[in-house]
Image (spheres, grey):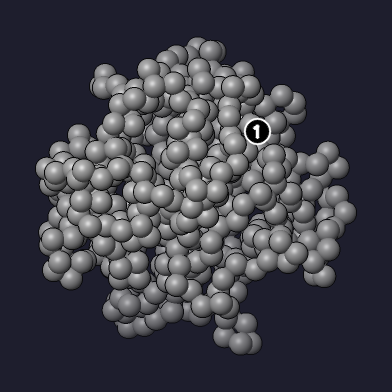
């Protein structure tokens, strides 16, 4: 554990200011494999300038900035500048189609959209022609945002600890995007908790290959580095050979199960892992066989974690002690978790129930959603929507979800969104989307479709059409034509029947 970590309770400080207390200005914050390097002093200076540019544009505390940027250090710099300026940051994948990004942008009503230069024309369309509210930034920080003059105001706006910092959108089960509103204190306190749980130290270096619009890559990893004064080695993308090549330069790696599956068998994996302190996995359950094979090849037992966009990381396997394959570990400092029965009361060890948790912080709710769609609390405990149990040793085992969300390669896919896209295609009647076990992705997005007409679309043609309106990870990897979908008496699709029918389809993949 980092014994030098300081984290005094504050009322009027942004998460950035809290993180900053643990930095040594001459220490490295981030470097790239191309040889670029920024110290914590550089980070402070760059975000100072970027914050004053935002304020010089007239952005006020509480207004929203949408980013659609390619992965780069400047992506992080802009995010942290928003923290300092009191501007609410809304990260979106640059791979979203206009059909996907449009409703989110309309919902957020951003004061500014910052995008990669290649997306500028599309961004202006998404902003309904308001080109003055669209700026560009490439992976080197160049673009119209860089050309802005920085105002003379102070970089740090007075931000209350409970002011909102980020809106992170996840698709709802109805297909309509839902934004979790996350305040400054949520980031600062939960990062502190995870730093304690994973024993982050100032001399740690994290190999970072995760998306910067995702809770895992933007919060679970980056916030821990900022909170402990550690450093990041940023790769342009995940590539197994490149990851293995750079392992001797770092002490930690955090990824999703699909990444670990792809690392297995990569030349030099075992030899280059010898000096690693921790391999961490999150975003989805790690298959036990991957856990075992990785340990066999590297001698390292992966640390599994469990969290949510709304709550950040809740549990982690211990860094000193038993790491159980298939377990999400134990609650982090400041977190309580139990499996609840129908009456809301805790169930005995080994008995599955609705996972319910309470932490030192809570998120602010869902952006512009009615009361009926806001998070459910009972005596301060949040109902997560996951199903699991606590075993006799106090470890959390997640056995399912009471929603239909599919986790494929670490990304959440919500069936109804894909079904709607399918059902809008000519010749398609009703569609059902579900997840099936997959040796590489954990779960594979799969569809069953009722066709009407005499010439149903070929699977490849259907997938190509879907890629015009959906991100590629949402597109079904297999589509099964059926005469009739299994329905309940009330007309709801029985996805469990389809899962059972096709469960072995991907068994030979990978």
Say whether residue 100 is left or right of residue 240: left
Q: In this view, does 43 lie above or below 276?
A: below
Residue 490 horizontal side relative to residue 433, left or right: right
Q: Is residue 413 visible?
A: no
Q: Tell me if residue 154 comes above or below residue 119 in the rendering.
A: above
Q: Say which residue appears at 13% left-offset and 61% top-offset.
A: 132
Q: In terms of depth relative to the viewer, which is nearer, 466 or 355? A: 355
Q: Residue at x 56, y 57 (%)?
A: 363
Please state the horizontal and vertical placement of residue 108, each as a whole percent of the image. Answer: 35, 66
| Residue 237 percent across, percent down from the top left | 33, 35
Residue 454 vs 254, above or below: the answer is: below
**Vertically, is 119 above or below 131?**
above
Q: Which residue lies under the disc numbered 1?
A: 197
Horizontally, residue 14 falls left or right of residue 143, namely: right
Which quadrant would residue 486 be assigned to in this image?
bottom right
Look at the numbered disc 1 and give the secondary structure of its residue: helix
Quarter of the view holding residue 385: bottom right
């Amino acid at each position: 554990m980092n014994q030098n970590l300081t984290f005094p309770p504050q009322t009027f400080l942004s998460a950035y200011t809290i993180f900053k207390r643990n930095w040594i200005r001459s220490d490295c914050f981030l470097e790239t494999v191309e040889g670029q390097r920024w110290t914590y002093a550089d980070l402070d200076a760059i975000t100072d300038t970027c914050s004053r540019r935002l304020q010089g544009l007239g952005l006020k505390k509480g207004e929203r900035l949408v980013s659609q940027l390619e992965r780069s250090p400047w992506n992080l710099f802009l995010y942290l500048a928003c923290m300092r300026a009191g501007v609410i940051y809304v990260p979106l994948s640059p791979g979203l189609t206009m059909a996907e990004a449009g409703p989110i942008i309309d919902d957020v009503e951003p004061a500014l959209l910052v995008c990669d230069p290649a997306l500028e024309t599309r961004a202006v369309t998404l902003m309904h022609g308001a080109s003055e509210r669209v700026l560009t930034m490439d992976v080197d920080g160049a673009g119209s945002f860089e050309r802005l003059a920085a105002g003379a105001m102070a970089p740090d706006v007075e931000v209350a600890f409970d002011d909102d910092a980020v809106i992170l959108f996840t698709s709802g089960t109805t297909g309509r995007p839902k934004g979790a509103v996350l305040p400054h204190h949520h980031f600062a306190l939960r990062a502190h908790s995870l730093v304690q749980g994973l024993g982050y130290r100032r001399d740690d270096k994290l190999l970072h290959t995760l998306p910067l619009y995702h809770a895992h890559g933007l919060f679970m990893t980056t916030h821990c580095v900022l909170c402990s004064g550690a450093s990041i080695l940023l790769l342009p993308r995940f590539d197994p050979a490149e990851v293995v090549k750079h392992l001797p330069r770092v002490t930690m790696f955090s990824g999703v199960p699909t990444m670990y599956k792809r690392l297995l068998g990569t030349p030099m994996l075992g030899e280059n892992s010898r000096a690693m302190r921790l391999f961490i996995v999150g975003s989805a359950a790690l298959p036990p066989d991957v856990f075992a094979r990785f340990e066999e090849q590297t001698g390292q037992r992966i640390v599994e974690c469990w969290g949510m966009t709304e709550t950040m990381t809740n549990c982690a396997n211990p860094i000193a002690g038993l790491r159980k394959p298939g377990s999400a570990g134990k609650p982090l400092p400041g977190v309580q978790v139990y499996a609840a029965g129908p009456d809301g009361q805790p169930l005995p060890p080994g008995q599955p129930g609705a996972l319910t948790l309470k932490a030192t912080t809570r998120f602010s709710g869902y952006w512009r959603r009615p009361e009926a769609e806001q998070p459910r609390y009972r005596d301060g405990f949040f109902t997560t929507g996951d199903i699991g149990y606590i075993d006799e040793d106090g470890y959390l085992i997640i056995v399912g979800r009471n929603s239909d969300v599919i986790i494929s390669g670490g990304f959440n896919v919500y069936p109804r969104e894909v079904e709607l896209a399918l059902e809008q295609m000519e010749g398609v009647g009703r569609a059902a989307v579900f997840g099936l076990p997959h040796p590489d992705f954990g779960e594979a997005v799969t569809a069953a479709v009722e066709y009407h007409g005499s010439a149903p679309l070929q699977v490849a043609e259907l997938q190509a059409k879907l890629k015009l309106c959906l991100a590629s990870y949402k597109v079904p990897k297999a589509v099964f034509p059926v005469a009739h979908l299994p329905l309940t008496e009330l007309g709801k699709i029985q996805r469990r029947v389809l899962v059972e029918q096709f469960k072995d389809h991907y068994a030979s993949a990978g």
